[in-house]
């Protein structure tokens, strides 16, 4: 099935051809060169699944031809697509003379290169920004140096509205927080005051980093490190990773008042390279993915403090020089959620009637309020760092919340003093999808 579409581009007449193959149909194809200010060509098309196996978790890697010449994959951005709908590939013609600067009367053919019927992972080449999708079986291949250094790997996390979650749990919510009754674990009054059990609905699926960001990945995104390697990057602030959060006008990048990101930051550079709105997860996203269905204090039940510490040692390295991925992943394939580093979220704590951080409340897609600027602002960190001492059982709980100012300075929040732990703080990134 073929059809020619003609579109007047800037300084060029460009034609595009649609193609159909392998359970996918690509229609409404147009191609426009950005000439004369750029040689790049935007190739837009609509993707539809045609074999009756329609799924939001189905992906395709698309091949493009110009005439009878197959364009090199490293010249295409956006050639891996997730789900049906409108998509764009950006082709950057090489400057070696193999193609003219101005692309005229060009016939582009879009076809299927690979079908991924059940996406479980997304990978990002940090240098080029190229994105690819992998099946669930990729869990057997993700724990290698590549995805701890030059690339990032992300696990697909279904929403609580998804059939697979409802079939597992019998509800469209998950339980966040802790009831604080396990006094043997060292749970403090402050924990009880700011945790509290609630039922949360997450209506959008998302990808969450398989590992915390490493020093190599941080360096590739413009950060400065003495040793680029697969050890988690620590000693990084929310402001430094994401953009200024704490001015009196709610900040240039003060989530949720604005979704802006500082362009000259590691997350900003990742956004520019990929064209995707990567960010920290919200607190609810982090805890939902970490629990992976567990409603215990940890990844599984622990009857005593000593049992808890034994369990935590299975999942956390508790070693400042350990590379990521040396311990067991949780049930959804995420590594180093505890025993590694505190991990930033975008969530600012709700303040209760007593002025301190409030307990969780039932809600849908909670993102937290705009922070109180005079007090910080404060953001919630999740996870525990690598040297918690006698507090291991307490801070290794999945409900544990550490409040830190986004610039990692010591500060007071409504009469309570919070000390910065910048040297113990890192991050893992997320990408929220506009699908259930």
Image (cartoon, grey):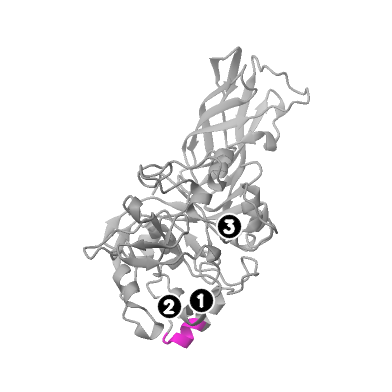
Q: Nearer the viewer, mark 2 or mark 1?
A: 1
**Circle 3 residue:** 213
**Circle 1 residue:** 388
Residue at mark 2 to residue at mark 3: CA–CA distance? 24 Å
Secondary structure beneath dot 2 equals: helix
Secondary structure beneath dot 1 equals: loop
Residue at mark 2 to residue at mark 1: CA–CA distance? 9 Å
Depicted 290 relative to depicted 104: above or below:
below
**Circle 2 residue:** 394
- Residue at 58% across, 52% down: 134
Instruction: Let me know if residue 389 is in the magenta part.
Output: no
Contact? badges 2 and 1 (CB < 8 Å) = yes
Secondary structure beneath dot 3 equals: loop
Contact? badges 3 and 1 (CB < 8 Å) = no
Task: Return the residue nearer the eye: 46 or 387.
Answer: 387
- Which quarter of the image is occupied by the N terminus? top right
| Segment colored magenta | 303-309
- Residue at 59% across, 73% down: 317
Q: Is residue 420 visible?
A: yes
- In the image, which disc is placed on residue 155? none
How many residues crowd mark 3 within 10 Å: few (<14), some (14–19), many (20+)?
Answer: many
Q: Earlier in the sequence, mark 2 or mark 3?
A: 3
Residue at mark 3 to residue at mark 1: CA–CA distance? 20 Å
Q: Is residue 371 visible?
A: no
Instruction: Please state if 393 lies on the left or on the right of 234 as rendered.
Output: left
Task: Return the residue nearer the eye: 189 or 269.
Answer: 189
Measured as percent of width and height from the top left, residue 31 is found at 57, 22
The residue furthest left is 353
């Amino acid at each position: 099935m073929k059809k020619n579409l003609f579109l007047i581009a800037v300084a060029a007449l460009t034609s595009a051809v649609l193609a159909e193959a392998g359970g996918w149909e690509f229609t409404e194809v147009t191609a426009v060169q950005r000439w004369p200010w750029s040689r790049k060509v935007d190739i837009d098309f609509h993707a539809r699944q045609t074999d009756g196996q329609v799924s939001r978790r189905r992906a395709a890697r698309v091949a493009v031809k110009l005439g009878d010449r197959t364009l090199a994959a490293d010249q295409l951005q956006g050639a891996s697509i997730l789900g049906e709908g409108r998509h764009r590939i950006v082709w950057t013609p090489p400057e070696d003379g193999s193609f003219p600067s101005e692309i005229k009367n060009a016939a582009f053919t879009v076809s299927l290169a690979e079908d991924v019927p059940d996406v479980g992972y997304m990978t990002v080449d940090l240098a080029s920004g190229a994105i690819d999708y992998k099946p669930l079986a990729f869990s057997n291949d993700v724990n290698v140096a590549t995805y701890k250094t030059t690339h990032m790997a992300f696990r697909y996390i279904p929403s609580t509205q998804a059939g697979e979650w409802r079939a597992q749990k019998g509800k469209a919510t998950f339980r966040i927080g802790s009831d604080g009754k396990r006094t043997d674990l060292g749970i403090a009054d402050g924990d009880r005051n700011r945790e509290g059990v609630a039922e949360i609905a997450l209506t959008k699926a998302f990808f969450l980093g398989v590992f915390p960001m490493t020093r190599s990945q941080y360096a590739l995104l413009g950060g400065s490190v003495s040793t680029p390697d697969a050890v988690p990057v620590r000693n990084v602030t929310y402001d430094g990773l994401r953009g200024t959060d704490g001015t009196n006008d709610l900040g240039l990048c003060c989530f949720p008042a604005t979704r802006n990101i500082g362009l000259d930051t590691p997350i900003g550079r990742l956004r520019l390279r990929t064209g995707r709105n990567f960010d920290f997860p919200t607190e609810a996203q982090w805890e939902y993915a970490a629990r992976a269905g567990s409603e215990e204090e940890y990844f599984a039940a622990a009857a005593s403090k000593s049992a808890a510490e034994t369990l935590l040692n299975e999942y956390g390295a508790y070693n400042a020089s350990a590379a990521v991925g040396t311990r067991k992943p949780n049930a959804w394939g995420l590594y180093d959620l505890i025993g590694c580093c505190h991990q930033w979220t975008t969530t600012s704590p709700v303040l209760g009637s007593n002025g301190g951080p409030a307990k969780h409340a039932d809600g849908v897609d909670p993102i937290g309020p705009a922070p109180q600027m005079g007090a910080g602002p404060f953001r919630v960190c999740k996870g525990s760092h690598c040297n918690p001492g006698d507090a291991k059982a307490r801070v290794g709980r999945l409900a544990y919340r550490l409040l830190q100012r986004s610039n990692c300075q010591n500060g007071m929040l409504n009469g309570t003093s919070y000390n910065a732990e910048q040297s113990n703080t890192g991050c893992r990134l997320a990408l929220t999808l506009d699908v259930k």
